[in-house]
Amino acid sequence: MVITGEESRWQRALPVHLVVAGAGLVARLFGFLRDRVARALLAAGITPNTVTLFGPIVATPVVFVWFLGYQRLGGGFLIAASAFDLLDGAVARIGGKVTPFGAFFDSVIDRYSDFIIFTGIYLYFLLNTPPKSHALYLTLWVLSLLGTLLPSYVRARAETLMDQCKVGFMERAERTVTVIVGALAGNLHLVLWLIAIMGNLIAIERILYAREVLQPETRRWGRLIWRYERLSPQHSVLCAACIVFLIFGHHLIPRP
């Protein structure tokens, strides 16, 4: 059988199309379930800000289970906590209760959730890994914490001077999925590698993008900025690659 050039290109692109289609299907399914639960919460009289507050409360047990060394159990608690993170916006949207303060409050509470998660990760590596690994992974922990806090600050500061600064790949949703998948796979060490690198990369990209917008004559680095939107083919493929790394990457970077 002779395979033409066009057929060969289609076959090479097939995995990409499958990843994109799968990501779209999962997103629609989660959206449907999220909206159903949001309507139930509204019917019970629960406000969006109350849902927002439940996020860090549900995430708090993560600190204790990672303190004891149970990575996968911590990942389970984070799934529950992230559900509230998804629901508050849906409750506000469906209930017609979207307010500027609600968006502000959600962003502030997200920082508390991040603090809780990174406290748990710190305790895990401090107490449940060999001392010879402490220097490396506590350094990665510091870089990961910086890569978690800095992108939102860069964006907020830039948007006081320009309309929008939402470029880069590793936003909060991707970071949350990274921590959950890595924990469930027993690979929290890969979570630190990924966020330490990509979390700081998104901050650098946002700085370059702000410079590009505010000083249009300095656009030579623009081609290095990730501009693809969530659920675009490029975004879906990179998400899939990160998930594969988080599940199987311990064969490349052994667990401490």
Image (cartoon, rainbow, N blue to C red):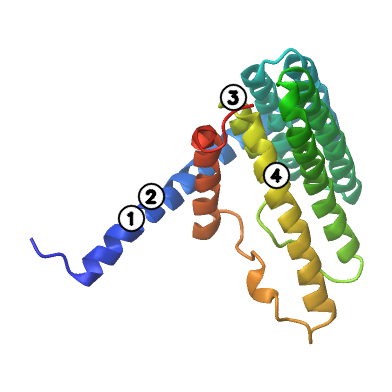
Q: Considering the image in quadrants, where does the N terminus appear?
A: bottom left
**In x, y percent, where is residue 42?**
75, 31
* Crowding at mark 1 (Cα within 10 Å: few <14, some 14-19, many 20+): few
Q: Amino acid at mark 3?
A: Gly
Q: Nearer the viewer, residue 152 or 21?
A: 152
The residue where tag 4 is placed is: 195
Q: Describe the element under mark 1 as helix, strand or loop.
A: helix
The residue where tag 1 is placed is: 14
Query: In the rendered view, would you say 138 is above or below 236?
Result: above
**In x, y percent, where is residue 109?**
87, 37
Q: CA distance from mark 1 to mark 3?
A: 30 Å
**Nearer mark to the viewer, of 2 and 3:** 3
Q: Residue at 66% across / 32% down in the picture? A: 189
Q: Nearer the viewer, residue 135 or 93?
A: 135
> Considering only order in the chain, which callout, 3 or 4, is on the residue closer to the N terminus?
3
Q: Nearer the viewer, residue 219 or 36?
A: 219
Label for residue 202? none
Does the CB distance between marks 1 and 2 fall below 8 Å? yes
Q: Describe the element under mark 2 as helix, strand or loop.
A: helix
Q: Residue at 72% across / 45% down in the picture? A: 196
